Image (tube, rainbow, N blue to C red):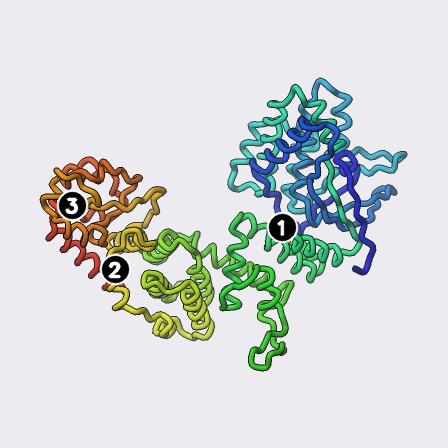
Amino acid sequence: MATEIKCEKKVIREIFNMWYCIPDYQRAYVWDTDQVRDLLDDTISAYRENKEAQYFLGSMVLKINEKSENNVSYTEYELLDGQQRITTVFLILACMRDMLTDYPQYQNSLAGFVYQAEDAILQQPERMRIIFNIRSDVRDFVNEHIKPLHGTCDSALLKDKMQAKDVNISIRNMANAMLVAHEFLEENKNEIIGYLSYFLNKVLMIYVATEELQDAFQLFTVLNNRGVKLSSSDILKAENLKELSAVDRTSWATRWEEMETYFGEDFDKFLSHIRTILVKKKQTTTLLKEFDEFVYSNQEYDRTQKKYVPRTPILRRGRDTFELLYSYYHTYQEVFDTDHSVVTGDYEITNYLKLMETGFGADYWIAPVLDYYRKYRRRGFVAFLKALDRKLSADWITAATPTVRMENVNAILREIEASQDSAALLQSKTFTINKSDFERVINGDIYGRSFAKYLLLKLDLIYRGSSTPMIPQAIASIEHILPRNPSADSQWVKDFSAAEREEWTNKLGNLVLISRRKNTSQGNRDYVEKKEKYFERNIEMFPNSIRIYQNYPEWKLSDLKKNHSDVVTELLNVY
């Protein structure tokens, strides 16, 4: 690297004699209860095991900034990595400060690790140990509820902040962390002084620091590649922010946090969908490498010439990347958060989205949905959703390999990009299915197949129509009407021969969805009793199950065959 890199090992009391800022391009504070509690439990366990042994908490990547305020000069360290841990320690120290009311001398020491009053003689500036430049409301929260003595003690307020959906994600998680810390400290109050001494003097971190932002970003990336647990979105953000001016960096960092707050742990999945839209090839390596090699690269490997050849990058780092991601973020919100029925007058869009979300068990369908909607909005959207669902589900049901299924998704994306008209797009051969193969499969045994629940949900959608919304159930079990193992003295054995049970038990026409877990003893009851005691209160959300319950007073071979023929016909009509 171009400049000198400092690397030191410091214990917590030394770390919190330094000054930090969390820059506006950093991610939100996202540690949850388990992560905060793990840090506390691990450090107190280390203290109990060996009070003289050091405990390694982790590493930090810092950019060195020389500052001057009111003729007081000092060094501020911009946190590029390690902010989750150091913020958590900062919150724990504030809670320790507020708990030690019987030890004012210790309170004063701890207060200095949180906030330092100006001291011109000692050349100390007035400021918080950590300045949060992420968002102004985060800074306000810190100044109001962490900076003052006893500021962390208002548990009712902290619970309100933690539970409020309209509060910044950093504030919610900070409030939760302080509640967790207070609970832990109360549980261990008999050991608190010894633990505090250990925490300050034996718990350590390693930091690496450089004066150049570009070098710090590079170090941030290198450490990630060597195993430091940073998300792909963190690195992608850092690599793109360094291409911007300071003014643009602040603006786009705020919007990035907005997206990160919205998607939470699924942010990398969202970025993966955008990669799929851009590259239109199966992902073969990490998300970061995919962006570097296939999105941003100005060359590609020509297998014919066996060498790299120049090409125009699909997308450029910096503003172009941020604008594209932000655009697709709004598209995602419009697709999945909008009540489309207000505009269309029915629930067809909502129901097909819910069917794919609930029934597919995978999210590879989201990329073409986003790409289509961004280009055509609601024009032909229902027809597109039906065509997409039909194609992807038929590929799955007829046992196309995952590679083939993904290639077909990418083919649809290429058709969307090349298309000029939504109606013409839907005539593309990319939506063609093997209907005879599909019919063969759904006429066979489907119980136990990965797509069985999807087909029953599809039947529910068909019989529901578009006048009411599809509401996914937390529990939805597949139940046999004719049970798999009826007792020897049951009516089932009288009505169905062994050969008939073998042939028909696992077919689509003998299966329904119920909103409870399977109960073998209840499921083996004779049909009339089974309807009244097992089905009646457990099928109200499943139109296909209700139809059978209402239309079939008995269940013999002729009834099963008729129902099977009916449901297969209904499915073939939409395929």
Q: Position of residue 116 (x, y in %)?
A: 78, 34
Camera-nearest residue between 329 and 307: 307
Which quadrant is the C terminus positioned in? bottom left
Q: Residue furthest bottom?
A: 305
Kind of residue at badge 2: Ile
Q: Nearer the viewer, mark 2 or mark 3?
A: 2
At horizontal 29% and vertical 41% (from top left) the residue drawn is 515
Q: Is residue 571 left or right of residue 166?
A: left
Mark 2 vs mark 3: which is more N-terminal? 2
Q: Nearer the viewer, mark 1 or mark 2?
A: 2
Camera-nearest residue between 139 and 103: 103
Mark 1 vs mark 2: which is more N-terminal? 1
Instruction: Examine the image and state in which quarter residue 107 appears.
Output: top right
Q: Is residue 406 left or right of residue 255?
A: left
Q: Is residue 81 left or right of residue 430?
A: right
Residue placed under numbered mark 1 in the picture: 230
Say the numbered circle drawn on residue 442: 2
At horizontal 86% and vertical 41% (from top left) the residue drawn is 72
Kind of residue at badge 1: Leu
Marks counted in the figure total 3
Q: Residue furthest top?
A: 102
Say the numbered circle drawn on residue 550: 3
At horizontal 42% and vertical 55% (from top left) the residue drawn is 362
Mark 1 vs mark 3: which is more N-terminal? 1
Tell me the distance, in whole angstroms, between the alpha carbons under discs 2 and 3.
Answer: 24 Å
SS at circle 1: loop
SS at circle 3: helix
Labelled pair 1, 2 in contact (Cβ < 8 Å) = no
